[in-house]
Image (tube, coloured by chain):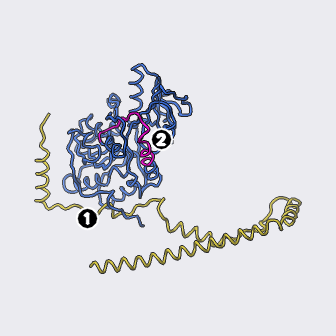
Amino acid sequence: MNDIDVEQIMSEIRSEIKAKGYKASDLKFTDIAIRNPENFDRESLARTLSDAGTKWQVELYPAVSGGRFKRLVKKAIRKLVRPSFYGTMKKQESFNMNVAATLSEINKWMRELESRIAELEKKIEREEK
Amino acid sequence: MRIVQIMPTLAFGDAVGNHARILKKIIAERGYRTQIYAKHIDLRLPKKTAQSVSSLPPLSVKDVVILHESTYSDFNRWIQTQPCRKVMIYHNITPPEFFRYYSREFFDACARGYDEVGKLTESFDMILSDSAYNRQNLTDMGFRCPNHVLPILIPFDDYKKEPSHKILNEYGAPGWTNIIFVGRVVPNKCHEDVIAAFHEYQRHFNPKSRLFLVGSLMETYANHLKEYAARLGTQNVVFTGHCPFEEILAYYHLADIFLCQSEHEGFCVPLVEAMFFDVPIVAYDSSAIGETLGGGGASCSRRKSRSLRREPCTGF
C-alpha cells in the first residue's frame, strides 16, 4: 500500500489554485427556486377562486334525463318536494356565497400585503445601501 | 423463546433490509426460532424472507422483539403494549428540516418519527445503534438502557457478483475520470455540494470528467439539482435514478473517486461499499461519516455551503 500525504496534496492543489487565480462560481444552490408542486401555486389559487366565484349558486331544477314519461314523473316529484328542500338550498347558497366572497377578500388582502412587503423590502434595501 | 424483528418496510437491496436479513440468519444459526415481520414486503425478495405483520402471533414474556427504527411507524405505540423483552435497532431518523422545502410527506414522517422515538425512552430493555453517533443521539434524547454499537451488517458476497455490462460498455471508454456518489437523492445528502465541487474540478482541472449520482430520486430535490447543474454549465452529470444492483456494481467498477458531502448519516453504507471496491474516498466529516470511514479515506471537516442553514429561494 502506498503512503499518501493528503495534507501535502491539498497544499499543492491550493497553491495551484492560487497561482492560476481560479475562483469558485458565484451561483449558489440557494439562489435557484425550488419548484415544488406542494408549495403555494398562485395560478392554481386564481383558478379555484374564479371557480368558487362563479359556481356558488345551487341549481334548483337541473335538467332531468330519461324518456318523456320519466321526465314528467321526475318533474312532478321535485315540484311536490320543493317546499321541504327549498329553504335548505337557499341556506346552502347563502353560505357558499359568503365563503366565496370571504376567500376573494382574503386573496385581495394577501395581494395588498404582498405589495406592502415588497415596498418595505425595497425601502430596507435602499437604507442598507 | 422466539426472536422476531419488526419493521415498517422490508425493501429489496436496501441497507436496513439487508441488515435484518443477515441478523435473521445469525439468530437462526444460533438455534432460535426467528422471523421478520413487516407491513410492506418487497415482492422481489425470496419467499419466506419475511411475513406480513398481520400474521404475527401474540408475543409472550419469554419472547424478544427487535424493532428497526428509521422513520415514523405505528409500531412505536404497538411495542409499548407488548409483554415481551424489547430491543430497538436504531438506524437514525433524518432531521425533518432537510425536507421542509422539498416534501411535506417526508418532513411530517421524520418529525413524527422524532417525536415518537422521544416518547420511548423507558420502553426498551436494550438498544443496538448502527454507530456511536446514533447512540449519542439516543443518549441526548434521554435513553438510559444498555445501548451498544452494532454496525450495519453488509452482505459482502453480493458485491462479488457480475456488474452490468451495459453500463460498463456505455461508460467504460478510457480517458475519462469518473466521480461517483451513491445514495438516495435526498436533501440531507447534500448533492449540491458534490455538484459544486465537481463543477470546479471539471472547469479548472479536467473537462473529460463525469459525475455519477447513483440512487433513487426525490423529484423536487433532483429537479432543483438538475437546474443548478444546468445553470452552472456543468457537463456530464448523470442522475441514474433507481437502478438494479448489478448497475450499482458497475458504477463502483467505473469509479475513480467516491465523493460524499452528506450532512446526515446514521452509518453510510456506500462508504463501506467504496472501500470494498478500493475506490478512494473524499468525504465531509459529518454525523457518523468519520467513524464509518475510520481512516479509510480523506475527510474534510469544513466546507463553505450548508444547505440546512440557509433558507433556499422558494418563489417562482
Q: Determine which residue is flagged by label 1.
A: A26
Residue B189, percent across and down? 33, 49
Viewer-nearest residue: B252 or A14: A14
Is residue A124 or residue B185 the one in the foreground? Answer: A124
Q: Mark 2, chain letter? A: B
Res B168 visible: no
User: What residue is disc 2 on?
Assistant: B76
Q: Tell me: B210 left or right of B242.
A: left
Q: What residue appears at the point 32 percent right and 59 percent down from the top-left corner? A: B309
**Tell me, what hue is chain B?**
blue
**Residue B271 in the image: above or below residue B224:** above
Three-letter code, disc 1:
Asp
Q: Would you say residue B115 sits in the magenta stretch?
A: yes
| Residue A31 to residue B285: above or below | below
**Height in image: B304 above or below B244?**
below
Give SS at disc 2. helix
Q: Which image quadrant: the N terminus of chain A?
A: top left
Q: Which mark is residue B34?
A: none
Chain coloured yellow here: A
Between the C-alphas of marks 2 and 1, the distance is 46 Å
Left or right: B287, with B33 as reference point: left
Q: Which residues are magenta?
A: B113-132
Classify 10 Å Cα crowding around label 2: few (below 14), some (14-19), many (20 and above).
some
